[in-house]
Amino acid sequence: MLSKVISAAYLALWISSCAVTSAVDQYMIRALQLMSETPLIDGHNDLPWQLRKQFNNELNKVDLYTLKTTHTNIPKIKEGRLGAQFWSAYVPCETQYKDAVRQTLEQIDVIHRMCEKYPETFMFATSSQDIIEAFNMNKTASLIGVEGGHSLDSSLGTLRTMYKLGVRYLTLTHSCNTPWADNWLVDTGSEPSQHNGLSPFGKQLIVEMNRLGMLIDLAHVTVAVMNQVLNMSKAPVIFSHSSAYSVCPNKRNVPDDVLMRVNNTGGIVMVNFYNDYVTCSSTATVSDVADHFDHIKKVAGAGIVGFGGDYDGVTRLPAGLEDVSKVPKVVAELLRRGWTDKEVKAALGDNLLRVLREGTTPLWGTEEWKDSHLYALVKHIDRITPYPFHLSLITLNVHFWPIVMSWCTATHTHTHTHTHTHTHWSTLLLFKIFLSNHDRHFL
């Protein structure tokens, strides 16, 4: 009789185990399905820095198919379904006032060369349209972010040159003050404030980044800088690799009041996987990372959250997230917690695609742009469409262009002066240019 009871108990345990395994598998299957429909866009990866440290940027000495000493290689990228990556062009704070610009240019160069060496895997990208194009070709869109304002040597000319080389975000500081901005360590009390946030030149830099269409990354800055930039930037901001301060009170993370302001201004916070920023300790789990996603969604909505793993830039990662191949586990965990498909797709890539569309449009932030009818029309189109309006040429041709034509015609009909007529038809031309910037094949 006892043996039958024991056998029944084992059977019950086995059935329970199978049910749990089946449920987990279903979440992962659903996660992978969503990742096949929407690109996973990660805000920060330091593989280029590892290429410099380990190989002096000599790509002929490394094979990204077999590399074992990094969190990132091509097989891991494929397994992790990485649709787009902001590769970090990072050089240490010790280069400030020395050769930071040269070293940063070398890091930008190695990213370009990496894309050229592995064209079957990587496609260099600077826009949301490029990301979609790469995703449709089963390639990883490769964008560049410069990590640390010290890389500019306080030069707007350097900023503009880096933009022309494909850089699409600048992290205003790393873990050191620049001559124009305070870094996050000031908030810990371990370093003195030099600018009470941004200096006058720092504010000038924000205006120029808006004008260029370069995203402003607020990871690594003080709360004062966060708020000053949010007060003045005309474009959405990003936190390329930061987590939620209320979950882990590390000064590198984002406090709730700032999360709400990011929501109000259309920005994004891309969750960092570094244990010290996840649990404020040396250990963490997939569930701990998901806690940050949950908190950001609760405070400011699923529309501002994204992925910013910080792979190859950190020394400790959560159990189960040891390299870039493991990221789908986070997606499955969010689904297990009740996130809808739409919310998951927003976090995967739709939020960042929106920020790129809005924040990297040249001239965004100028008074002419903000006051134009074109600006109002573009914002209206973004509000009324359930998907990014640049994704479908058929949709653009069939739906949006007639809307623009009728809008401009109506405006023209009700305009009685030559000056206003000229302005509205100029706006129509600008709109066509705007569309062509997002899809070079449209016009």
Image (cartoon, rainbow, N blue to C red):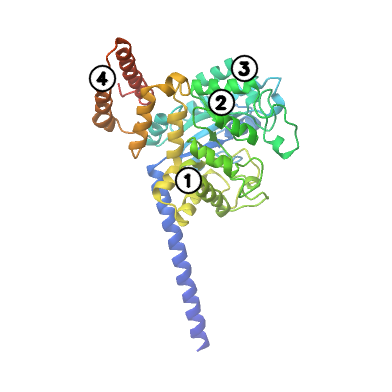
Residue at the spot of label 1: 301
Which residue is rendered at x = 46% and y = 42% of the image? 303
Residue 150: x percent and y percent? 65, 24
Q: Earlier in the sequence, mark 4 or mark 2?
A: 2
> x and y percent of residue 207 in the render?
54, 22
Q: Which residue is mark 3?
A: 155
Upstream in sequence: badge 4 or badge 3: 3
**Mark closer to the observer (4, 3):** 4
Instruction: Name the outermost residue toward the bottom.
Output: 1
Percent x, y for residue 50? 62, 34
Mark 4 vs mark 2, CA separation in Å:
55 Å
Looking at numbered disc 1 in the image, what kind of residue is underneath it?
Gly
Q: Which mark is residue 414?
A: 4
Kind of residue at disc 2: Val
**Dot 4 lies on which element?**
loop
Crowd band around label 4 with a 10 angstrom C-alpha radius: few (<14), some (14–19), many (20+): few
Q: Which residue is mark 2?
A: 110
